Image (tube, rainbow, N blue to C red):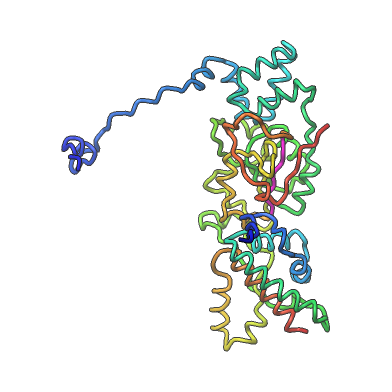
Amino acid sequence: MAKSAPPPPRSGQLPDLDREAVDRALATVVPDARDRAFVLRCILEEGPRHHRIASWALLRALAGLLESRPPAAPLEAEAIPTEPLRMRLPPSVAQASEDAAFPIGIPKRLLARSLEDDEETAIALEALADGPPHHALANAVMLWLMEALAGR
Amino acid sequence: MSERSPAASSARIPLVGAPLSLPRTPEPPPDVEERALARTDLGSAFELASAELGFAAASWLFVENVAKVGGDAAVRALGDELGTTFSVLDLVVRRWLEGRRRPHVDAGRLRSALHGVRRVLVVGVEAEHLDALARALDPTVRLGLLTYRLQRVDWPRVLANFGDRIEPVDLAEFQGWAGARSGLLTFVYGERHGLVNVLSAFLRVSGPDVRTQFREIIGWDVLGAAPDVYPRYLVETAVSDLTAFVPLAER
């Protein structure tokens, strides 16, 4: 019987998963390299293994699409309305933190275009930002890459 | 089926009347190692020093001073006496006898790893390293010290050494220090085969819920090699659990 590849570690680097393409694609949205590293760590190194690898596959596919389509103009991320993505700190201490929001939010332009009205958009935003951070951050990054694709 | 004693049952669950005062459980007798440690003033002194200065700082302090008085033979005796219980001391004794001396504390690489961080929550006490950290970081960067340790610590006395520069942070409130510009820093007592020795307090504050709330999770090696003796006061965790590992700067 063929030996199966060892599973990736619970956390830390996933040596077989190329994250550079996603990192490059995200650079216009999150310019600080350490901020990007934080976001990608939360998505690709935290949480259950199947989530990490599934998110990687989807983000890698989107990043590949982006690279195959040169932009007419660079994405102006600051011009796109964004919903902040807050950390889920215990309520008793949340006020003490000075910056309990991730360095990436959820872009609203594509959602507003695609969904029926503000109510649907609000419901979608609430769901996209809810749950464990690796979920919410993967949602945010995917939507940002879709925003970039929409402009190409 | 075994029959329950009515007397015992009613004694445990009083249905009426005042709270029952249960007989106190006698303290378990100390084990062999605890008895041996309590007999020696040196053991008690090292326990206190290591709790309030840190295992590495206290080990070098004891080894250097014992060597001044009794030379290598006394250092070897110190290791024989306390090394089994205090694994960091055991390693420092061995290093001393190999001719090595107290390593230089260099916060330069740590400062680089903490670039852009506005708050640093430190897990563990290492007096020299905390001094160096406080000096190296911009005064606008807040420094907190988790006041949780398995050893008894007089925290006000420890914190008084740093004036107001380092703030006490209770275990119940440490997530108030989380954020996108926050760093969690733990002292590391050697690395071997991808595993590092840390205080168990680090495991209390680095669970899956917290790992996504601090931008940086940094280990700062204060020892340079993993102890050979099973570390009674330390636990192992994976290097890959850290976002940065700052090795010891050897002289």
Q: What residue sits 78% from the left and 25% below the top?
A: B101
Is residue A62 shown in magenta? Answer: no
Which residue in the rendered view is the most extreme toward the top?
B70
Which is nearer the eye, B195 or A76? B195
Residue B162, given in percent of the width and then of the height, sits at 68, 35
Q: Chief secondary structure of the magenta span?
A: strand
Residue B8, given in percent of the width and then of the height, sits at 20, 35
On screen, residue B219 above or below B27: below
Which is nearer the eye, B118 or A22? A22
Which residue in the rendered view is the most extreme toward the left?
B6
Q: What residue sits 79% from the left and 25% below the top?
A: B100
Q: What residue sits 56% from the left and 61% below the top?
A: A88
Quadrant of the snapshot with the N terminus of chain A: bottom right
Q: Which quarter of the picture shows residue A130?
A: bottom right
Residue A99 seen anywhere in this rendered image of the structure: no
Q: Which residues are magenta?
A: B216-222
Quadrant of the snapshot with the C terminus of chain A: bottom right
On screen, residue B59 above or below A127: above
Residue A9 seen anywhere in this rendered image of the structure: yes
Is residue B217 shown in magenta? Answer: yes
On screen, residue B125 above or below A104: above
Q: Which quarter of the picture shows residue B250?
A: top right
Residue B108, given in percent of the width and then of the height, sits at 81, 42
Residue B34, given in percent of the width and then of the height, sits at 50, 22
